[in-house]
C-alpha cells in the first residue's frame, strides 16, 4: 500500500486545526505548494526530534476538482449537513484542512506560519483552533476521550483506503468544532453525565449493557455489522477554549477508510437510533462547523496530477 500521510500518528499533547478556503485564481499557488509540503514539515521537524511534529493535509470535494485533473477519490463529497428535530450538524466552508500535531504547540505554530505564508493571498484561513491535551486525556466535559480508538493493524484497517487505486493509503477526515455549555453540564449530577456519555467519568469504565442508555454517546456511536463486528473510526479529539470569550469546546477529528461510517455515527447522534432520542451529549454540545476532506497518500502530494486547464491562471499573492 502507498505510504499514508501521518494519519495514524499517536495522540499528541498539542494540535492546530486550520481550515482554509482557496481564493479564485489561487489554485495554482496551492497546487505548486503541495510537493513542497513534505520538505517544509521536515525542516521544522528534523531539528526538533522530541516534538514528534506531524502534519496531515486534507482536500475538500469542490477544491479537488479545482486542483486536479483525472480520477477523484470514490467517496469524496461535500459534508452532508444533518438536521435533527433538536440538533443540527452544519456544513461550513473549507477547501483545505491542516491537522498539525506535536508535543508542544510552537512547532505546530511555526509549520502553519510557513505553509500559510507560502500560500500568500491564495487562501483564506476561515477557522483556527488551538487544541491542548487536558488532564488524563480528558475532554472539557471531564471524560477520558479516545479510549476505544482502534490501535495497530486494526487502526490502519479502519482508517486507510484499500479498495480505490490510485487513492489507496488515503483516508477520509470529518472535522467538526463543538462548543459546550459547561454551566449546564456542571449543574447535572455526575450520574446523569455518566449516562449521557455511557461511561463513568471518574474511572472511564463503560456502563454495562442494560444500564447504558440507548441515547448515550457511546451507544449511538457504536456501529455494528449484521455479524456483530464493530465498524471503527480513529478519533483525535482535542479540547480548546477561550476564557475571555467564555468558549469551551471539543474539536472532533475522525479518520475513516469509508466516510459513510462516520456519517452513520453522526446521523445516529443527531437524529437518534429511534426518533426523538438524539445523543444526550448534544444537550450541552453544539456543532458550529463541519467538513469532509480526503487525505491523499503522501506520494500523491509529492507528484499531484495536473491542474485543470484554466484553473489558477491568475495566481494571486505569490
Ligand atoms: C462534542 C464532541 C464529542 C465529545 C466530547 C466526545 C466524547 C467522547 C467520549 C468521552 C467517548 C468515550 C471514550 C472513548 O472511547 O473515546 C467517546 C467515544 C466515542 N465517540 Fe465521541 N465525542 C464527541 C463527538 C463524536 C463524534 C462527532 C463522533 C462520530 C461521528 C464520535 C464517535 C465516537 C466513537 C466511535 C466512540 C467510541 C464508541 C465505542 O466504541 O465505545 N464522537 N466520545
Image (tube, grey):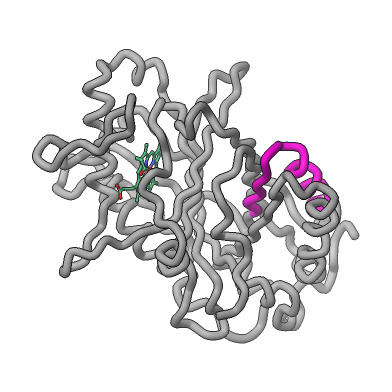
Name the residue rendered at 39%, 46% in the picture: 89
For the N terminus, give its image quadrant: bottom right
Name the residue rendered at 43%, 39% in the picture: 287
Residue 238 is left or right of residue 308, and the answer is: left
Whereabouts is ligand 1, in terms of quadrant? top left
Residue 185 is situated, as x and y percent measured from the top left of the image, at 34, 20
Residue 301 is situated, as x and y percent measured from the top left of the image, at 70, 72
How many numbered marks, from 0 up?
0
Front residue of 135/56: it is: 135
Quarter of image, res 270: top left
Note whether 237 is above or below 166 in the view shown: above
Note whether 284 is above or below 262 in the view shown: above
Front residue of 135/84: it is: 135
Residue 87 is left or right of residue 72, and the answer is: left
Name the residue rendered at 48%, 58% in the picture: 255
Residue 180 is situated, as x and y percent measured from the top left of the image, at 43, 28
Front residue of 161/286: it is: 161
Q: In the image as oriented, which residue stretches furthest toward the right?
A: 318
Which residues fall within the magenta stretch?
Answer: 98-116
Quarter of image, res 277: top left
Front residue of 209/306: it is: 209
Q: Is residue 183 visible?
A: yes
Note whether 116 is above or below 207 in the view shown: below
Q: Residue 100 magenta-drawn? A: yes
Q: Residue 178 magenta-drawn? A: no
Amino acid at each position: 500500500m502507498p505510504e499514508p500521510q501521518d494519519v495514524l500518528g499517536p495522540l499528541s499533547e498539542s494540535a492546530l486545526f486550520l481550515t482554509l478556503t482557496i481564493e479564485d485564481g489561487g489554485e495554482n499557488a496551492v497546487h505548486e505548494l503541495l510537493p513542497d509540503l513534505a520538505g517544509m514539515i521536515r525542516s521544522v521537524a528534523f531539528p526538533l526530534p522530541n516534538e514528534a511534529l506531524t502534519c496531515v493535509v486534507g482536500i475538500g470535494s469542490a477544491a479537488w476538482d479545482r486542483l486536479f485533473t483525472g480520477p477523484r477519490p470514490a467517496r469524496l463529497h461535500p459534508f452532508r449537513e444533518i438536521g435533527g428535530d433538536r440538533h443540527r450538524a452544519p456544513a461550513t466552508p473549507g477547501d483545505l484542512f491542516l491537522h498539525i500535531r506535536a508535543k508542544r504547540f510552537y512547532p505546530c505554530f511555526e509549520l502553519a506560519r510557513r505553509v500559510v505564508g507560502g500560500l500568500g493571498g491564495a487562501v483564506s484561513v476561515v477557522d483556527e483552533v488551538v487544541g491542548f491535551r487536558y488532564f488524563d486525556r480528558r475532554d472539557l466535559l471531564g471524560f477520558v476521550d479516545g479510549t476505544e480508538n482502534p490501535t495497530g493493524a486494526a487502526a490502519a484497517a479502519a482508517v486507510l483506503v484499500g479498495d480505490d487505486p490510485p487513492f489507496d493509503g488515503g483516508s477520509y477526515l470529518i472535522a467538526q468544532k463543538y462548543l459546550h455549555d459547561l454551566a449546564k453540564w456542571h449543574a447535572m449530577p455526575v450520574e446523569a453525565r455518566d449516562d449521557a456519555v455511557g461511561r463513568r467519568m471518574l474511572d472511564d469504565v463503560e456502563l454495562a449493557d442494560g444500564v447504558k442508555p440507548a441515547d448515550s454517546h457511546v451507544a449511538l456511536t457504536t456501529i455494528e455489522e449484521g455479524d456483530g463486528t464493530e465498524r471503527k473510526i480513529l478519533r483525535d479529539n482535542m479540547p480548546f477554549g477561550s476564557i475571555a470569550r467564555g468558549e469551551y469546546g471539543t474539536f472532533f477529528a475522525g479518520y475513516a477508510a469509508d466516510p459513510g461510517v462516520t456519517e452513520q455515527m453522526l446521523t445516529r447522534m443527531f437524529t437518534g437510533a429511534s426518533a426523538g432520542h438524539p445523543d444526550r451529549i448534544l444537550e450541552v454540545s453544539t456543532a458550529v462547523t463541519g467538513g469532509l476532506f480526503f487525505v491523499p497518500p503522501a506520494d500523491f502530494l509529492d507528484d499531484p496530477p495536473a491542474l485543470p486547464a484554466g484553473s489558477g491562471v491568475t495566481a494571486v499573492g505569490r
